[in-house]
Each structure stands twice: as structure tokens, then as C-alpha cells.
Image (cartoon, grey):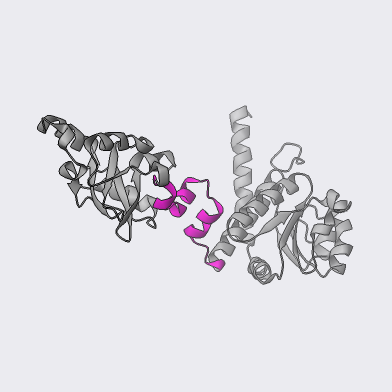
Amino acid sequence: MDLLEEIKQVILLEQATLGDLARSVDSSWEQAVELILAAPRKLVLSGMGKSGHIATKIAATLSSTGTPAIFLHPSESLHGDLGVVEPGDLLVFFSKSGESDEMIAMVPSLKRMGCKIIAVTANRDSTIAKNSDLVLFTPIQKEACALNLAPTCSTTAALVLGDALAVALMKRRGFASEDFALYHPAGRLGKRLLYKVEDLMRKGADHPKVLAQASFSQLLKAMGVGGVNAVNVVDPEDRLVGLITGFDLRHAFETYENLKTLKAQDILFANPATTEPGMLAMECFERMRTSAKPLNLLPVVSGGKAVGMITMQDMIRAGL
């Protein structure tokens, strides 16, 4: 058998394992979901070796999808780290053989604390399975390696089982995209669903604005504030009167001979399109992008008052 054929065989064998796993799904999976939902305290996942890596990944997946979970290393737990477990916690043990000495040694203390245990194992008759409140069986015919030793099919089955539980729990909890964004603020989805205009707009000292009575020279100075080639024109109460952009300035240079006599109110664009601080930045971005008239910035208005300015570039830099 050549190398490529061997690689294909590994993939096919692991695929077959997942088929066996799908066919093995029974009421115990539903019971596991109910146990997790009913758990009065936190969810603690544990496993040795490669199973531990799988448990770590599943704990992270659960936590990011609405089911807070932590990973506890079996060896470390036997030397004090078991203190992270509290009475009423629910433990999920990942062990193909179900005979990990370290995990078996954890059981008496867990039982004494009144903790329930779910075992994810390929051995229903194992010590861990017999000492668990519920067993999730992962049917493994053989591992994909030629020696039938390296965890391959078994870890794939455990990983998919954990993912399936996480997704089922998401559905039961009514976990929505807004919740996902809350736990992923640095991701693109998080930014799109969490950032509001007020988070990205130019405000305070970076807010380019002038009074309607401002002179042309004052207007030119204000145009550079915040690096925006535009200014909001306001009245003494900060109510928005209009907008002046670089286009309006060029028009003034071409139209008027004596620029010194001009006031901001003479060249402003009245009734410009605006946005509000509380609008989702992504909605504002889409509004600007799809506008029939090209828009690359908008005054931000709250209660009739100009409170800032937001640009297309601001939102692009933020990752929208």
C-alpha cells in the first residue's frame, strides 16, 4: 500500500468510527444534556494524555457557547488541584479504556463531595464506567494506526461527541448569535454585533465641529481635527445645522473671490444624513455602503445635538 492510500485508509477508518458513533446515539445522550442543564454548579472535564487534550478543547467549546466549563488535569488534581471542585459540581471523564489510575483515584473524593460523574469511554465494563452516574459509549473497533495503539479513532469519536453535546446544549439554552458575540468580542462577528456607533465615532477633542458663524480661517483649522476632511456645523447649543466636506471647500474656492468674508453657514450642506450613537456600527456601515448617494462619513446626532462624527474608514479599521 502506498503512502497516499494509507492516508486515505486512516480517513476512511475514522469516518467509519463516526458512523458507528452516530448509530450508537441513544437516550443516554439526552440524559447527559439534562444532567448538564440541571447541574447546580459548574461543569468540570477531565482526561489523561490525548483524552485530556480533547477534554480541554470541549471545555473551551462549552464555555464559549453558553455552558461554563473548566478542565482539571487528573494528576494535578491528586496533589491539591481537586480543591477547584465544589460539592454539586458535575464531572465529565474522558477515557477510552476507563482504567486511568489517576482518574480512578479521583472518584472517592468526588463521591464524598456529592459530585456526579459522566464517563465518556469505549469500555462500558471499566472501573470508571461502573463508578459513574451515566456512561456515554464511544464504539471503537480499532485505532487508525498500524499498531492499533496511537489514539486516533478514539479521540476523534470523543471530540465529535463533545461537539455534539455542546451544540445540543446551545439549542436547549436558546443561545443566539448575540450571545456568541458577547463571548467573542475580538472576533469579526463579535465586532459586528457588539460595536455601536458611539464606540467608534470621533468625539470630544477629536470631534470636528464649528459654529455656524465661524470664519473661513476657523473653518480651515477645524477641518483637520481628528484627521477627518469634514466638520459638523452647529449652533451655540450644539444643535446640528449642517455639514461641510472637502467637496464644499473646493466649491467655495472655485466660486468665491473673497474667502475672508465667508462664514461656515454660507457654504454648509443643510440637512445631511445622520446617524445615532446607539445604532449598531455594522448597520451604519451598511447604510453608508448601500446609499444611493455616496457616503463616507456621517454626523452623529443625539437629541438634535451633534455629538460626534463617524467615517467609513473608522469602521473598516475596527474590523467591520
Looking at the rendering, which quadrant does residue 137 occupy?
bottom right
Q: Nearer the viewer, residue 232 or 295?
A: 232
Q: Which residues are magenta?
A: 173-202
- Position of residue 180 relative to residue 28, above or below, is above
Tell me the quarter of the image containing the C terminus. top left
Q: Nearer the viewer, residue 164 or 36?
A: 36
Does residue 249 appear to the left or right of 279 in the view shown? left
Task: Give the percent coordinates (x, y) of residue 92.
Answer: 74, 60
Residue under the point 30% across and 49% down: 299
Q: Can residue 241 be spotted in the picture? A: yes
- Position of residue 35 relative to residue 151, above or below, is below
Residue under the point 56% across and 62% down: 170
Q: Nearer the viewer, residue 294 or 33?
A: 294
Q: Can residue 121 be spotted in the picture? A: no
Does residue 257 appear to the left or right of 64 in the view shown? left
Count of all numbered marks drawn on residues in the image: 0
Residue 135 within the magenta-colored segment of the rendering: no
Q: Nearer the viewer, residue 237 or 76?
A: 237
Task: Give the percent coordinates (x, y) of residue 91.
Answer: 76, 62
Task: Give the percent coordinates (x, y) of residue 3.
Answer: 62, 28
Does residue 185 appear to the left or right of 122 in the view shown? left
Tell me the quarter of the image containing the N terminus. top right
Residue under the point 52% across and 66% down: 174
Q: Main secondary structure of the magenta part?
A: helix
Task: Give the percent coordinates (x, y) of residue 41.
Answer: 72, 67
Looking at the rendering, which quadrant does residue 237 occupy?
bottom left
- Position of residue 68 relative to residue 7, above or below, is below
Residue under the point 65% across and 65% down: 29
